[in-house]
Image: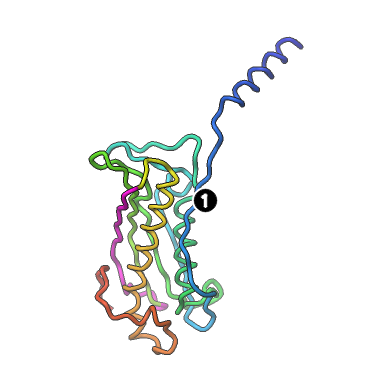
């Protein structure tokens, strides 16, 4: 009995020594300023497929197959990281405030995350981000809907480069959404409540629905 226990402990120790170290990766998207307190409230809701609601790092080896990294993972699930990135960007730049849950009539930003992965395209490693976006008024009317799709070439075929590439892709996607929202808010809110970066009048790349 004692010999069997000793053998099991020895095998466990050998297996533990031979397992690679788990590496954890995160996104980095710089933001400006602090949270707004004088704008309308905003609720951000993110939905995703099951594999993007867990901290898996996903590699698409073909259009029909997804693979999960065994010894590397994200700091949080992609859905959670996307939600936090939007929250930081929209609350730090305004014109929304962070008291949304306590308000009976907030604006709602709905994000459906579809792709957050590494893939091969003609031998080139890419980071791909795809999400659908909907922006609803406090009355529950859909003001905007559209899709953001971005692919970024990675410096190397590794997960550090993937984290850098998806950070860049998400930062660009957030800017797309902010530029799309800005013209709507200009018609609904006094210009004095809008920060300068939200007072742009460029044509957004997301198609608005009927208001």
Counting from the top left corner in percent of width and height, residue 59 is at 37, 40
Indicate the quadrant containing the C terminus: top left, top right, bottom left or bottom right: bottom left
Task: State yes or no: residue 140 in magenta.
Answer: yes
Taking the spot 25% from the left edge, 68% from the top edge, the residue there is 205
Taking the spot 30% from the left edge, 53% from the top edge, the residue there is 151
Residue closer to the observer: 5 or 161 = 161
**In the visual, does 41 lie left or right of 4?**
left
Residue closer to the observer: 132 or 11 = 11
Taking the spot 40% from the left edge, 89% from the top edge, the residue there is 190
Counting from the top left corner in percent of width and height, residue 53 is at 46, 49
Task: State yes or no: residue 38 in magenta.
Answer: no
Determine whether 17 is above or below 170 in the image.
above
Indicate the quadrant containing the N terminus: top left, top right, bottom left or bottom right: top right
Q: Which secondary structure is most common in the magenta stretch?
A: strand
**In the visual, does 91 lie left or right of 67?**
right
Taking the spot 76% from the left edge, 11% from the top edge, the residue there is 2
Q: Which residues are magenta?
A: 138-154
| Outermost residue to the right | 2
Q: How is the image coloured?
A: rainbow
Q: Secondary structure at mark 1?
A: loop
* Residue where numbered disc 1 is placed: 76
Question: Crowding near pointer 1: few (<14 within 10 Å), some, many (20+)?
Answer: some
Counting from the top left corner in percent of width and height, residue 193 is at 44, 86
């Amino acid at each position: 009995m004692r010999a069997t226990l000793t053998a099991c402990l020895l095998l466990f120790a050998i297996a533990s020594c031979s397992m690679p170290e788990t590496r954890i990766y995160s996104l980095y998207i710089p933001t400006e300023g602090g949270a707004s307190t004088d704008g309308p409230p905003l609720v951000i809701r993110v939905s995703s497929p099951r594999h993007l609601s867990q901290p898996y790092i996903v590699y698409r080896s073909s259009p029909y197959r997804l693979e999960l990294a065994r010894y590397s993972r994200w700091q949080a699930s992609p859905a959670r990281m996307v939600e936090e990135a939007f929250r930081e960007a929209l609350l730090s730049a305004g014109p929304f405030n962070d008291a949304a849950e306590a308000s009976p009539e907030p604006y709602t930003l709905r994000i459906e995350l579809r792709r957050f992965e590494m893939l091969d395209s003609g031998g080139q490693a890419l980071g791909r981000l795809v999400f659908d976006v909907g922006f609803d008024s406090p009355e529950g009317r859909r003001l905007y809907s559209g899709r953001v799709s971005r692919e970024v070439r990675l410096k190397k075929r590794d997960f550090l480069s993937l984290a850098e590439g998806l950070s860049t892709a998400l930062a660009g996607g957030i800017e797309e959404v902010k530029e799309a929202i800005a013209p709507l808010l200009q018609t609904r809110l006094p210009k004095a409540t809008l920060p300068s970066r939200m007072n742009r009048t460029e044509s957004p790349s997301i198609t608005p629905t009927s208001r």
